[in-house]
Amino acid sequence: MQIVKLVSRLLASHYRDQPQLAQSQAYAPSNIALSKYWGKRDTKLNLPITGSLSISLAKHGTQTQLKPIDDANHRIYLNHKLVEPTTPFAHKVVTWLKWVLPAGLVLEVKTYNSVPTAAGLASSASGFAALVQATNRLMGWELPDKKLSILARLGSGSACRSLWHGFVEWYVGECDDGNDSFAEPLPYVWSQLRLGLLQISTENKTVSSRQGMLHTVQTSTLYKKWPDQTTTDLRQIRSAIVAQDFEALGATAERNAMTMHATMMAAWPPLVYWKPESVATMHQVWDLRRQGIPVYLTMDAGPNIKLLFLKQDQVVLQDIFNQLQVVAPFQP
Ligand code: PMV
């Protein structure tokens, strides 16, 4: 009910009872939080307990095409395959479409991910961000970015940060209705910054971020430390970006990710997304730092590792990690 009210307020004068185009499409990049969103103050509206700050993954993301069809049910394709309506993925997409579309409008949704779905590379973020933008075009809503970000947040919290390239901050907000919790791009370019994706596993995770954060908030004895720590980290990361201080950015982002995982491990039953290979890779990164190579790591709710480094160290790191997929977030 709360969501229906929020959506109708967001759409208000933008609402259209018919699509304005025969089809539409949009692309959104995936994003990795440097200071993480972990814990909700409202589980229905996806309202976070703290703010967060991310960097988008340029060409790694989701392309989505929408077309109205004459059918009783929405038809959803993921990477060229029809998705069973009973899967959690289809359920999330259809639920979101029902909130925003006029009754009776049925769509074919074709979505292509260039990041592995549900393997901790935040494909739900780019997925919902692309879906929101393609729907905005199809329906001719012409919504301002703030409202698009809120609509994306309703699908998946971190999706509200995937509407832009570069650094993006999601404001925690304080209103109960969620109208002031949205993301905005930060006006800083850091052309030498690089991200490296190390895929440890592409298996579907058994505990979604949604379930994982709820379980952590409810049972982890360490969680009460998290909101203050991550708020401080966010501030330090923002300052490191402004000053282009790579060591400060890397160290704060790595500590933030490790602290988030520590809150999960202290939950009961414990929640550990790491695989043995994740831990081995962490030790490799720490060894490299001891040898003087400035490389840091971050991880989301999954076993995969993302490295942070500068362009000057790219060749050396690609030599060491031969599976490394390098992302230059500020190169088109
Ligand atoms: O947006 P969700 O529900 O997929 O949660 C994302 C949670 C993390 O990826 C672990 C952190 C973040 O800020 O992206």
Image (cartoon, rainbow, N blue to C red):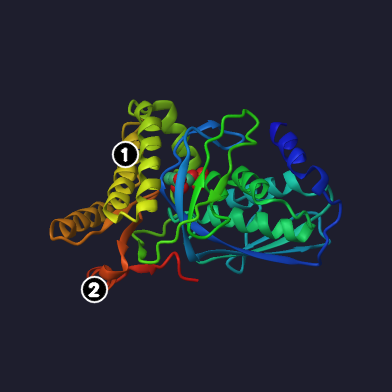
Quarter of the image for residue 105 reads bottom right
Kindly tell me whether residue 301 is visible in this rendering. no
* Residue identified by numbered label 1: 259
- Depicted 147 relative to depicted 164: above or below: above
Foreground of the two, 3 or 332: 332
Label located before the other in sequence (2 or 1): 1
Extreme residue in the left direction: 291
Give SS at disc 1: helix
* Residue identified by numbered label 2: 319
**Residue at the image point whose x is 37% and y is 68% from the top:** 326
- Depicted 79 relative to depicted 271: above or below: below
The answer to the question of whether label 2 and label 1 lie on touching residues, with beta carbons closer than 8 A, is no
Give coordinates of residue 212: x percent, y percent.
44, 38
**Residue at the image point whose x is 23% and y is 71% from the top:** 316
Viewport quadrant of the N terminus: top right
Give SS at disc 2: helix
**Distance of label 2 from label 1 (alpha carbons):** 29 Å
**Residue at the image point whose x is 31% and y is 31% from the top:** 266
**Residue at the image point whose x is 50% and y is 58% from the top:** 30
Amino acid, disc 1: Thr
Amino acid, disc 2: Asp
Quarter of the image for residue 259 reads top left
Rate crowding at label 2 as few (under 14), some (14 to 19) or many (20 or more) other CA atoms within 10 Å.
Answer: few
Q: How many marks?
A: 2
Foreground of the two, 96 or 16: 16
Kindly tell me whether residue 145 is visible in this rendering. yes
Give coordinates of residue 282: x percent, y percent.
24, 53
Give coordinates of residue 64: x percent, y percent.
64, 64
